[in-house]
């Protein structure tokens, strides 16, 4: 008997860890998340990642977003020297859960370029 999902419904039954393309790494980066709320109002919030993967991240916001929402994320560099601006990349919100501190969100990158300033292990 095969354990490979045969269709999208079976894939939806898999946990996030089973669907994830790469392993989560617990690293905290300060990020700026911007986008539009459901009512159309623009927002720009500072927060930190709770963990990252090569393809996305998890973070908490005080505002509720929804699956499928598009946001721009910019890495905020906090060095003692001159400010270093990182590029902004687009992400899609793929899950949302209420948390003690607001809303915990999972986001996946929509661009292939390297975003996080870390090297990820090679895939086996």
Image: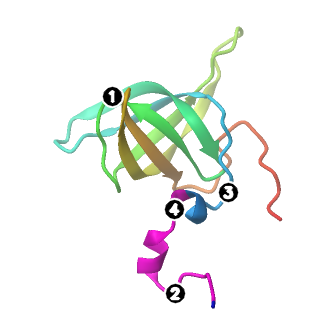
* Residue under numbered circle 1: 62
**C-alpha gap between disc 2 and disc 1:** 38 Å
Disc number at residue 6? 2
Query: At x 82% / y 57%, what residue is drawn?
Result: 122
Q: Nearer the viewer, mark 4 or mark 3?
A: 4
| Of the image marks 2 and 1, the number of the one nearer the N terminus | 2
Q: Residues within 10 Å of mark 4 (few under 14, many from 20)?
A: few
Q: Nearer the viewer, residue 2 or 121?
A: 2
Query: At x 37% / y 28%, what residue is drawn?
Result: 100
**C-alpha gap between disc 4 and disc 3:** 14 Å
* Residue under numbered circle 4: 15
Q: Residue furthest front?
A: 1
Q: Which residues are magenta?
A: 2-16
Q: Secondary structure at mark 1?
A: loop
Q: Residues within 10 Å of mark 1 (few under 14, many from 20)?
A: few
The answer to whether mark 4 and mark 1 are in CB contact below 8 A is no
Q: Nearer the viewer, mark 3 or mark 2?
A: 2
**C-alpha gap between disc 3 and disc 2:** 21 Å
Q: Nearer the viewer, residue 105 or 46?
A: 105
* Residue under numbered circle 3: 22
């Amino acid at each position: 008997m095969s354990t490979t999902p045969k269709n999208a419904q079976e894939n939806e039954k898999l946990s996030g860890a089973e669907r994830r393309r790469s392993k989560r790494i617990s690293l905290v980066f300060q990020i700026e998340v911007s986008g539009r709320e459901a009512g159309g109002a623009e927002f720009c919030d500072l927060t930190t990642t709770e963990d990252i993967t090569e393809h996305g991240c998890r973070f908490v916001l005080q505002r509720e977003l929804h699956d499928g929402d598009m946001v721009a994320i910019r890495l905020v560099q906090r060095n003692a020297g001159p400010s270093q601006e990182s590029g902004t990349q687009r992400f899609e919100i793929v899950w949302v859960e209420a948390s003690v501190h607001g809303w915990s969100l999972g986001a996946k990158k929509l661009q292939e370029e390297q975003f996080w300033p870390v090297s990820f292990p090679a895939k086996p």
